[in-house]
Amino acid sequence: MALVPFEQAAFKPHEKLWTLLKLSAHVAEILGWWKECVLYDELDFAKPSSGSAKKYESTADLLAVHDKHLAQAIKILTEVDEKVFDDMWTMRSGEHKFFTLPK
């Protein structure tokens, strides 16, 4: 994350891929999914999110979001009863179910 050259945020490694900024944001934000995976039984991309899309203005912004989600994930994983990992979890987009598997 710290090595993302923000001045090249619009760079696309391939025409079909996301920009460097969007790819970096995904990496920074995906740690936030631990909350969805552990505390809830599903993640539904068709439901409205609980906030507006984050605007990143610098590599420091990406790092701050990454570090915030990492700290939250560590807190959740150290406090949750490990029996919760036997529960099933589903990733979906509305009626389209991508998969269901144990947490």
Image: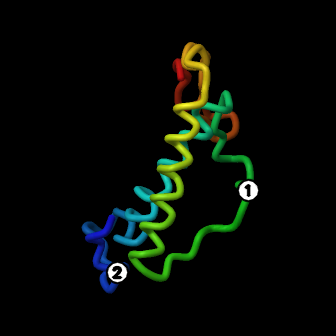
Left or right of residue 10: residue 71: right
Q: Mark 1 near mark 2, Cβ–Cβ under 8 Å?
A: no
Tag 2 or tag 1, which sits nearer the N-term? 2
Give the residue pinned by disc 1.
50
What percent of the width, then of the height, locates residue 3? Answer: 26, 70
What percent of the width, then of the height, locates residue 37? Answer: 58, 34
Q: CA distance from mark 1 to mark 2?
A: 26 Å
Quick one: quadrant of the N terminus?
bottom left
Asked whether 50 or 18 is in front, the reply is: 50
Query: Which three-letter amino acid code belongs to the residue tagged 2?
Result: Phe
Label 2: few (<14), some or many (≥20) within 10 Å? some
Asked whether 5 or 77 is in front, the reply is: 77
Which element type, helix, strand or loop, lies under badge 1? Answer: loop
- Tell me what residue is drawn at x 42 percent, y 75 percent: 60
What percent of the width, then of the height, locates residue 55? Answer: 56, 76
What percent of the width, then of the height, locates residue 56? Answer: 50, 76
- Tell me what residue is drawn at x 45 percent, y 64 percent: 25
